[in-house]
Amino acid sequence: MADTWIALKEYVRSGDDDDAFVTRCFEESTELVQDYIGESYVPEKRLALAILKTGSELYSQRDAPQGISQFSDVDANPIRIARDPLVAAKPLLRKYVIGIA
């Protein structure tokens, strides 16, 4: 799983000064995904991708601690809404998780 931690760090474009936060996001995302899949078998690559996507959601929530983060600049960037961190992982895992439609 060390490769997944490195992939998460690269995916969220964090610097070395952010390693502790990336580690927390990685650990929490791993636990969330494991809790979601339970005893279901999920191929390793799909599991790693689900952990990456969930970790990225957790990392990004820092920019929206009260639910919404607005970026006001001349380019009119979109707002960031805090949401279920498993939102991107659930579709990836759905067919492997028994009883989840």
Image (tube, helix red, strand yellow):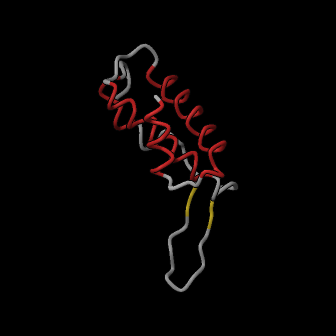
Residue that extends furthest to the front in the rendered view of this protein: 16
Q: How many marks?
A: 0
Q: Is residue 64 above or below residue 75?
A: above
Residue that extends furthest to the bottom in the rendered view of this protein: 74
Q: Is residue 98 above or below residue 45?
A: above
Q: Nearer the viewer, residue 68 or 16?
A: 16
Query: Which residue: 62% across, 61% down?
Result: 68
Q: Which quarter of the image is occupied by the C terminus?
A: top left
Q: Is residue 101 left or right of 12 when viewed as pictured? A: left
Give the image location of residue 22, x and y in percent.
59, 43
Residue that extends furthest to the right in the rendered view of this protein: 66
Q: Is residue 68 left or right of 36 when viewed as pictured? A: right
Q: Nearer the viewer, residue 78 or 8?
A: 8
Location of residue 7 by image quarter = top left
Q: Is residue 86 left or right of 47 when viewed as pictured? A: right
Q: Is residue 40 above or below residue 6?
A: above
Give the image location of residue 85, x and y in percent.
53, 42
Give the image location of residue 87, x and y in percent.
46, 43
Query: Which residue: 48% across, 31% down?
Result: 2
Residue that extends furthest to the top in the rendered view of this protein: 39
Query: Which residue: 54% across, 43% down?
Result: 84
Give the image location of residue 83, x and y in percent.
55, 48
Query: Which residue: 46% across, 35% down?
Result: 51
